[in-house]
Image (spheres, rainbow, N blue to C red):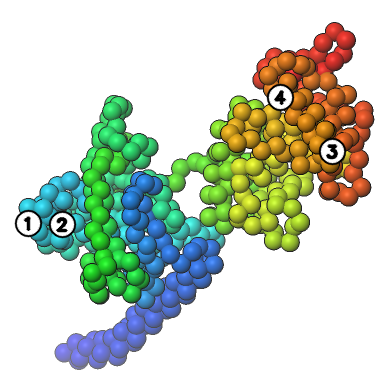
Amino acid sequence: MTMGKNVLRLLFLILPFMVISISCQKDNLDEVANQDILEARMWFEITYSPNLIIDSKNSARKKAISVPNWDHAKAFFHKESKTIEVPLISDGEFGFASKESFLAFQATGEKRYLESRTYLIIESEKGNKRGFLMTIIPEKSFKLKKNFEAFRSTYRKWENDFNGSVLYHELDGPFTNGWRITEGRSTNRILNDGENGIPTIVSKGCWAAYLVSWTYTCEQSDKGISVGSDVIAQSADCKYYEEWEYLYTVCDDDGGGGGGSGEGEYDPGPQIIDAIYDPNSTLSPREKRRLEAAVNEFIEHNPIYALIWQRLLTNNVRLVFHINPSIQSNAEISGNILTFRDIDEITRVNVGEELIHRAQKLTYGEAMVSIKRNFEFEAKLVQDLATLNNEPWRSMITNGFADPIDNGNYIMWLTSLWRGEILMDASTLNYHCNRWFYPNPANNYSDPNFVPLFFIDIFSGNNGGGSSDDGTIMY
């Protein structure tokens, strides 16, 4: 009996300390989570625009503009990363619904059939952060099963019995990828079909899937504000848009794990720029996406440009990309460092010229020096030939001729080269280069003995040119 009383007395003594200990642990976890949320918010606001746009297929008639609701942000911890999930405050409402849910809404008028939830996700892994949008779309049957309390899943942690889809978008709107989730398992990959209409050819194991995107937008940001499905205010300025189309293709996937596993993840896929993008680069995600678009445009613009790009890949060239507002030119390359003055200078023309200069370096090595303007002239000549068929055409060189006669002679020579009426020879190139003015550096000069080996190599490889019996260089 005494022993029992002692045990009870001991438990009463220990229990308050256990409660205090658990409470302290929770407080510590909350403190860590709050610090993670603060860091995520600072990173987001420095890196991105405060407004988020989601566009189901990069072609929506009306895009919903949202901002993160940081007061309701939550932190989640994973095996190798942690995520901050932030609900959105929108001008009106927007969402996605399956075909069955949309038909149920039409039949019953129950708006909760239309509901989906979109969150800003900021994921941290090994000190690196990335941001994206996650949209959870429960199936009609799952909504009914849960009495419309269907949004307990979080990123990479799906309810064991969750059935529906998850879609991922970049923070500036474009769709990246998605997953079909069945009983808490990622079973099917969702891909953008890349077309505006119904896909006519679907590969084996894939089929077209209906999604209905809808938007209830308002003209002013202080009207029609909503958090999830809770409308704070309503306005006559709000308008409803509905888009019915086959937005995605669903394909069987061999993967998939148990409920609560790290499946169904955001995956933007490989980017073409990754082949030469040095990890020491300092571009923001938005700047890198601009670079990706510029490089793609450069490669697709002309077969010669594609050949130059391939040459860089073949030689394992890796470039470090920076933004530096203090540089004098729009863009410049020094060794393997390519710098832009600001994000607006990350264009096909600027990126292309610097990639051409890096490819020239592969040909000339240390002999390529900026004081000889022949190298600059050669790079611009390549671009003039590659774009001569464009409408309207803008020469990279003609504004450097002081004499209109020199300007006219250059265009005649360029056009004849483009038509294949004459052959390339170094002496004519150097003649035009000698009459061409280029300001950088100030004391540059034209080398009369310059041989355009890069030009010969590129155009010979493309058109099968070479040199004539008398030594004339041609392409």
The vertical placement of 450 against 103, above or below, is: above
Q: Earlier in the sequence, mark 1 or mark 2?
A: 1
> In this figure, which residue is indicated by the disc labeled 4?
415
- Label 2 Cα crowd, 10 Å radius (few <14 / some 14-19 / many 20+): many
Please, what is the three-letter code of the amino acid marked with disc 3? Asp
Q: In which quarter of the image is residue 359?
A: top right
Q: Earlier in the sequence, mark 3 or mark 4?
A: 3
Q: Quadrant of residue 341?
A: bottom right
> In this figure, which residue is indicated by the disc labeled 1?
108
Q: Which of 175 and 181 is in front in this view?
A: 175
Q: In this view, does 132 lie to the left or right of 419?
A: left
Q: Label 3: state its secondary structure.
A: loop
Residue 319: percent from left, percent from top: 68, 45
Q: Earlier in the sequence, mark 4 or mark 2?
A: 2
Real-space CA distance between mark 4 and mark 2, rounded to the nearest whole angstrom = 63 Å
Real-space CA distance between mark 1 and mark 4, rounded to the nearest whole angstrom = 68 Å
Q: How many labels does the image show?
A: 4
Please, what is the three-letter code of the amino acid marked with disc 1? Thr
> In this figure, which residue is indicated by the disc labeled 2?
113
Please, what is the three-letter code of the amino acid marked with disc 2? Tyr
Real-space CA distance between mark 1 and mark 2, rounded to the nearest whole angstrom = 9 Å
Q: Identify the mark at residue 416; answer none if there is no mark.
A: none
Residue at the image position 33 percent from the left and 55 percent from the top: 62
Q: Identify the mark at residue 403; answer none if there is no mark.
A: 3
Q: Which of marks 1 and 4 is nearer the N terminus?
A: 1
Asked if disc 1 and disc 4 are in contact, CB closer than 8 Å, the reply is: no
